Amino acid sequence: MWSFIHKLGSPRWFYAISARLMPWFWVAAALLIAVGSVWGLAFAPADYQQGNSFRIIYVHVPAAFLAQSVFVGMAVAGLVFMVWKIKVADMAAAMMAPLGAAMTFIALFSGAVWGVPTWGTWWMWDARLTSMLILLFLYLGVIALRGAFASRDSGSRAASVLAMVGVINIPIIKYSVDWWYTLHQPASFSVTSRPTMPLEMWAPLLIMVLGFYCFFIAVTLMRTRSEILRRESNKRWVRDLAVEGR
Amino acid sequence: MTPKRKQKLFVILGLVSLAAIAVGLTLYALRSNINLFFSPVQIAAGEAPIERQIRAGGMVKEGTVARDPDSLDVAFTVTDYVDDLEVRYSGILPDLFREGQGVVVVGQLQPDGWLKADQVLARHDENYMPPEVAQALEEAGYSPADYQAKAAEVGERLGAEAVGESGN
């Protein structure tokens, strides 16, 4: 196990191992998202109060899950980079940030679209919505900070620190609906408790969540691979690869 | 792990926990401002400012919605099952508005204790279900929203807090 993790820390090994893993995640993501969206949008029952606008949940919840998980992933990668000086972790963190920002935007946007018919407003400065907006700004800050330094190493370190400190926002997002009065309803889906809806509603949601996670892993592996080639382009093994034309 | 790396790890963990404490204390100090709305029990205890824009939240009390047949005027009572607040509103209500539904009302509290609303927002709970299930539950004598029990519990807790605070 440890030797596997050590190997992953080497760009060359990461490149080789990810080549074998990546297709599986792409296939799983495509299958899960296809099944989940058709099931959720066409076959799952409508809600007794909200009717069909309830189906936005099948995009909103997976995007919101991923928005938070990607940030935690970025912070962990930042910690690994700062403490153990593993460059692959920094490359992965750099590649995760735009996807996380996009997922945060999707969660906010789908939430606004959902809010109009159900709440009667598309935005309200309640604790859940505001902390999620802060998450979007943290993502943009991490991306901007990384590019704001002349040397790549300083940028990497600054971005890692911001990601590690910014991770404090994640429990605030998660518990905002329990700690304060909010317009947003409490969590409908979590690892620790029973779903608050019947099976025919949460099964497609679970499939969508898993599909989004597979999509995230596949995209991160793919982008980290090209980043490895870019940063290690003067290394011998990369040149050999180029010569072989693969 | 080399001593240098260990030191670095502790420095980072220390920084993050200090930042967490700072954020935690800030949120604790601002806790009443982060709440989106006042509960009727807080308004009854005089915590909400009068004739300034505030938000009040709770459940629409069963059997209190009175519509004026000639205009868009509507009056209803918002309750947290401890105290009640009378709301008067003129305008279009959201689709989810109904008796027993959670709402957030934006408006000004009047000196004689009712709230003049500019906007009514509907809350909904996390209990999604198909219409047939909701109907079956209702026929079996259950209310689809067991949120009510939770709201009552929160109301009681706040009531106890308000009593405790006025006691100090």
Image: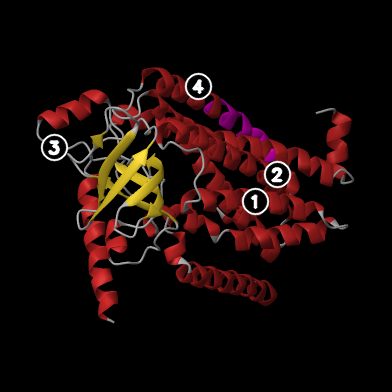
Q: Earlier in the sequence, mark 1 or mark 4?
A: 4
Q: Pointer 1 indicates a residue of which chain?
A: A
The residue that mark 1 highlights is A137
Mark 2 and mark 3 on one chain: no
Q: Is residue A207 above or below residue B123?
A: above
Q: Pointer 2 indicates a residue of which chain?
A: A
Mark 3 touches mark 1? (CB < 8 Å) = no
Badge 3: how crowded within 10 Å, few (<14), some, or many (20+)?
A: few
Q: How is the image coloured?
A: secondary structure
Secondary structure beneath label 1: helix
Q: Is residue A245 above or below residue A235?
A: above
Image location of residue A190, percent across then percent down: 38, 46
Judged from this view, the residue extending furthest toward the front is B70
The residue that mark 3 highlights is B142
Badge 1: how crowded within 10 Å, few (<14), some, or many (20+)?
A: some
The residue that mark 2 highlights is A95
Image location of residue A161, percent across then percent down: 68, 63
Main SS category, magenta section: helix
Mark 1 touches mark 4? (CB < 8 Å) = no
Q: Is residue A232 left or right of residue B69?
A: right
Q: Earlier in the sequence, mark 4 or mark 2?
A: 4
Spatial CA distance of label 4 from label 2 is 25 Å
Mark 2 touches mark 3? (CB < 8 Å) = no
Spatial CA distance of label 3 from label 1 is 44 Å
Q: Which range is magenta? A: A14-28
The residue that mark 4 highlights is A34
Secondary structure beneath label 3: loop
Judged from this view, the residue extending furthest toward the left is B140
Secondary structure beneath label 2: helix
Picture residue at 52% right of the left edge, 72% below the top:
B21
